[in-house]
Image: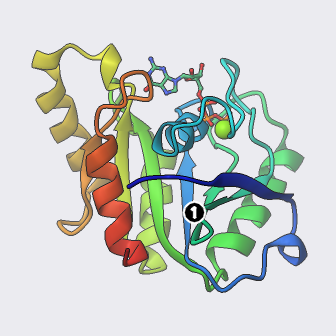
Amino acid sequence: MRVNEAEIVISAVSKTQYPSDPIPEIALAGRSNVGKSSFINTMIQRKNLARTSGKPGKTQTLNFYIINKSFHFVDVPGYGYAKVSKAERTRWGKMMDEYFGEREQLVSAVLVVDLRHEPTDEDCMMYDYFKYHDLPVTIIATKMDKVKKGKRPAQKKLIREVLEVDEKDPLILFSAETSEGKDEAWKSLRSHLKM
Ligand code: GTP
Ligand code: MG
């Protein structure tokens, strides 16, 4: 996929702010600091259009990016960061429900997990939540550059088993450092975007 144009449309905190364009959307989900924003940047070949950080909790709003004037990537705040108050967690849950539960334009989700680690209970809940909403999911096991080649197949198998991934949903090894997995990821996303 050749990305010629990519820009931020809006950082939204409530649904009244979502763009109204009837174009397809792909939304990201995953733990804080797992690499969701980096995934977007690598896919669109921009260094820091989606703001990233070494510290968890960088993305706090629903950030809509328009790509090639034809679809949106939606960057989403991560979950699972310990230093978050109960009130913030509630706010996060409401924001997620408002978006994932109701958004007509949403065609598919990308669940980003860390290839080095076993998925957490929250990762499993997130995946189950998508399946409950009948959403096709592309699972991205990122930071593959941090896992030795020989160890990758076992980690991949572990993630598939723990998440109980549907046969139809691909699990793709990815690295925002080396761009490995990028073509495969585009192939999956394009199938949902029908491009
Ligand atoms: P929140 O917005 O806080 O939810 O985090 P996020 O999931 O958007 O993570 P982000 O993309 O900001 O990346 C977090 C950190 O991981 C940054 O320091 C990135 O440079 C690093 N990182 C992301 N992807 C990779 C990768 O594939 N390989 C390596 N080595 N580092 C990565
Ligand atoms: Mg982020």
Relative to 51, 163 lies left or right: left
Residue under label 1, please give it.
68
Q: Position of residue 68 (x, y in %)?
A: 57, 63
For residue 190, above or below residue 62: below
Q: On screen, 177 above or below 81?
A: above
**Which residue is drawn at the image coordinates 64% and 43% (left, top)?**
79
Q: Quadrant of the C terminus?
A: bottom left
Q: Note whether 132 is above or below 181 in the view shown.
A: below
Out of 35 and 3, give the one closest to the viewer: 3
User: In the image, what residue type sits under mark 1?
Assistant: Asn
User: Within 10 angstroms of label 1, few (less than 14), some, or many (20 or more) residues?
Assistant: some
Residue 119 lies, in percent from the top left, at 38, 39
| x, y percent for residue 163 | 31, 51
Q: Is residue 162 visible?
A: no
Residue in the image at 36% along x and 58% along y: 138
Q: Quadrant of residue 155?
A: top left
* Residue located farthest toward the front when viewing the structure as drawn: 4
Q: Quadrant of the N terminus?
A: bottom left
Q: Can you give x and y, in whole percent of width and height, for residue 185 in the image?
A: 33, 51
For mark 1, give the secondary structure: loop
Say which residue appears at 57% left-offset and 72% top-offset: 70
Residue pictured at 80% horizontal, 72% vertical: 18
Q: Nearer the viewer, residue 120 or 153?
A: 153
